[in-house]
Amino acid sequence: MTSHPSPDHHSSPTPSGRLLPFGTRLRSAMDERGPLCVGIDPHASLLSAWGLDDDIAGLERFSRTVVEALADTVAVFKPQAAFFERFGSRGVAVLEQTVADARAAGTLVVMDAKRGDIGSTMAAYAETFLHKDSPLFSDALTVSPYLGYGSLAPAVELARESGAGLFVLALTSNPEGAEVQRAVREDGRTIGATMLAHLAEENAGATPMGSFGAVVGATLGDLSSFDLDINGPLLAPGIGAQGAEAADLPRVFGTAVRNVVPNVSRGVLRHGPDAGALRDSAARFADEIREAVAA
């Protein structure tokens, strides 16, 4: 993959060698570049649509093209780890290079790995993606809290130490998620609302925004019964191919809309491999989102 210029302040360390908190860096990137996250999802059908083989060469070409086309304009990339891991160690090596190139170009990287476990295993997952010396170090990681929010403690602690962030699955866009996330606890609060409350506690007092966010689907419609004002980012899949539109964001997220990071994957990626078409598509989505959020 092609090397990029030295990183800008979104992903580079302070003079002391420590990264600014993820929430601070994300707020800056969103304000400067617009609140758009572009997924890097090299599944077989998309590689085929680009005229690429479903192999390591196709994977590398796809990932390099996305990064080179968009890394200087979008705020966040979200590589889906599974689409790289399916190729084994060589696929993980491509993922490592993709993360390194994106971050070197100043784009924040949210690793979509949805890890979740307990104790030393959760700590090992955290070290894989959140330790500053790991070849897969990312600015944030998606995690699953459904072994209990407390099981995420190793990831929370390492994220704070590294200046990284987390996105916790709270109200996901898949229909099956409701059977867990909208289940009601003995205290009358849903599981999803409980996760949001935990995140609000993590972010208490942080400025301009905390580093511990939630995954909340943009396709879910009216969420006014949930308190989304967690003083942290809300990663919102569903814009584009899944049916949600930028104009839906204020209705879904209410007063928390300024902290929403809408994720678009197929809606942008289907325009490849032409770099100009990728840039034009991402710019259109960013403009539409910026306009909707500011309304």
Image (tube, grey):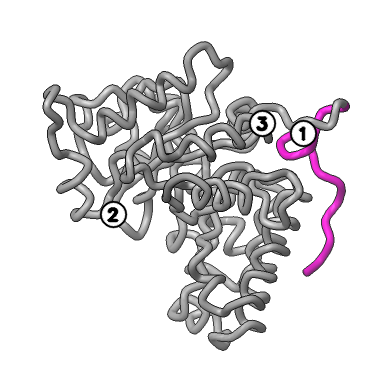
- Tell me how far mark 3 sits from mark 2, CA to CA: 38 Å
Crowding at dot 2, Cα within 10 Å, few <14 / some 14-19 / many 20+, comes out as few
In which quarter of the view is residue 230 placed? top left
- Tell me how far mark 1 sits from mark 3, CA to CA: 18 Å
- Tell me how far mark 1 sits from mark 2, CA to CA: 34 Å
Q: Amino acid at mark 1?
A: His
**Residue in front for this viewpoint, 15 or 37:** 15
Farthest-out residue, top: 205
Quarter holding the C terminus is top left
Please state which of the two labelled residues, at mark 1 or mark 2, is closer to the viewer: 1
Residue 102 screen position, x and y as percent = 70, 54
Q: Which residue is mark 3?
A: 161
Quarter holding the N terminus is bottom right
Q: Which type of secondary structure does the marked residue at label 2 adopt?
A: loop
Q: Which residue is mark 1?
A: 9
Q: Amino acid at mark 3?
A: Glu
155 displayed left or right of 164: left
Residues in magenta? 1-15
**Residue in front for this viewpoint, 72 or 15:** 15
The image shows residue 99, relative to residue 166, as above or below, that is below
Please state which of the two labelled residues, at mark 1 or mark 3, is closer to the viewer: 3
Q: Amino acid at mark 2?
A: Gly
Q: Which type of secondary structure does the marked residue at label 3 adopt?
A: helix
**Residue in front for this viewpoint, 186 or 20:** 186
Residue 118 screen position, x and y as percent = 43, 47
Residue displayed at 69% across by 68% down: 64
Label annotation for residue 243: 2
Residue 187 screen position, x and y as percent = 14, 22
